[in-house]
Amino acid sequence: MVNSNSANITEPDLIQGTVIASQANFYQVRLDSNESLLCTRPTRLKKIGQSVFVGDRVLVKSTEFERGAIASVLPRETELERPPIANAQQILLVFALEEPTLDPVQLSRFLVKAESTKLKLLLGLNKVDLICPEKQKAWQERLCAWGYEPYFFSVQTSQGVPSLQKVLANKITILAGPSGVGKSSLTSLLIPEIEVRVGEVSGKLQKGRHTTRHVELFELPSGGYIADSPGFNQPHFDFSVESLVNYFPEARARLAENTCKFHNCIHKDEPDCAVKGDWERYPYYLKFLEEAIAFQEATAHKKDEESTVKTKFKANGKKYTEPKLESKKYRRVSRKVSNQKLEDLYNLQNLDSDELE
């Protein structure tokens, strides 16, 4: 994926590439020439607050010892903070139909979180070989009513995998889903040399088996990348209560046809609500709404607590907190103000003495 601003580059000694992995201050960059270069981020970029995400299109300058330095980061088309990844175009949410059995509530939780990213959402259902055609049809119709067209596939038999390969080609795709549904097996099937590539990148970044995992991009043979994003696999509703309704396609369709009586309706108990009704996932919406409200209240309470204390460090480096003093009540008076007050008092005393005379 080439950034639209790349044509404006005039410095001949800079090379374009994509950041495919990062660890501390080191970045593995896949150059457009299909070579890989280990790069650092110069202090200059740190000073201006320029972050470098996996997925970033960057300009790099080669240095000695077969390393490079990131000279600049090209404008991002998309950006996610959690997981930290730039220029991703879609999310492939992977679930299993059996072993473990597909749970509609858990699936909805992941769907809502994926919808909140505003990226294109692909739903892949693995282990289709373990269910009968009638059950597959039932899930197809059910998910269609939710607003999704799932991709049924099997890593074991490769059924349906070619269809996935087509929609993943030449895109940066975030791979997400719960554990045990076949994400790793799917990645190995799509990228046969993945173990070799992981070993090469991990070695250059000096990443060990017990190192905290970060987002990494794995190049597909047909072009494009899959983003391995462990941080996305534990979805939390860390968005506003009001926005939740927008992450249910069925609710969006209802709001497109009608409007609620109140502009600040949260679609729970309000009269003349356009969203309330007999649709399958409305109970899920209410459940997630309570979680979103609880999260929002907990966040607000935490901010209130943090505002009343300050963090300090002892001589041995141990961190501790202490209450903040009321700024107006306990603020130390400056020397200038103190001298001014003394001078005013002195002048007032002289004025009183003159009046007595």
Image (cartoon, rainbow, N blue to C red):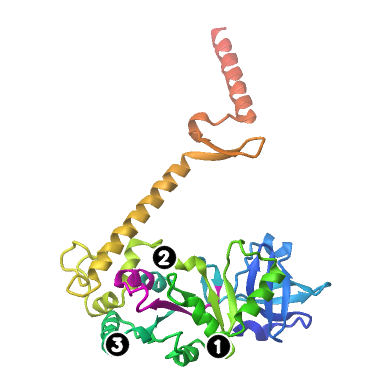
Q: Nearer the viewer, residue 276 or 178?
A: 178
Q: Outermost residue, top direction? A: 357
107 relative to 302, above or below: below
Q: Which amino acid lies under the numbered mark 1 shown in the image of this protein?
A: Asn
Q: CA distance from mark 3 to mark 1?
A: 33 Å
Crowding around mark 2 (Cα neighbors within 10 Å: few <14, some 14 to 19, many 20+) is some
Q: Outermost residue, right direction? A: 64
Crowding around mark 1 (Cα neighbors within 10 Å: few <14, some 14 to 19, many 20+) is some
Left or right of 308? Residue 254 is left
286 relative to 78, above or below: above
Mark 3 and mark 1 residues within 8 Å of each other at the beta carbon: no
Residue 28 horizontal/vertical position (percent): 68, 73
Q: Which residues are magenta?
A: 86-111
Q: Nearer the viewer, residue 307 or 95?
A: 95
Q: Which residue is mark 1?
A: 170
Q: Earlier in the sequence, mark 3 or mark 2?
A: 3
What residue is drawn where x is 30% and y is 69%?
A: 105
- The label on residue 191 is none
Q: Earlier in the sequence, mark 3 or mark 1?
A: 3
Q: Which amino acid lies under the numbered mark 3 shown in the image of this protein?
A: Cys
Foreground disc of the pair 2, 1:
2
The answer to whether residue 17 is seen in the rendering is yes
Q: Which residue is mark 2?
A: 235
Q: Which residue is mark 3?
A: 132
Q: CA distance from mark 2 to mark 1?
A: 27 Å
**Residue 54 falls inside the magenta stretch:** no
Left or right of 312? Residue 239 is left
User: Which quarter of the rendering shows the C terminus?
Assistant: top right
Q: Earlier in the sequence, mark 2 or mark 1?
A: 1
Residue 94 horizontal/vertical position (percent): 42, 77
Q: Nearer the viewer, residue 135 or 75?
A: 135
Crowding around mark 3 (Cα neighbors within 10 Å: few <14, some 14 to 19, many 20+) is few
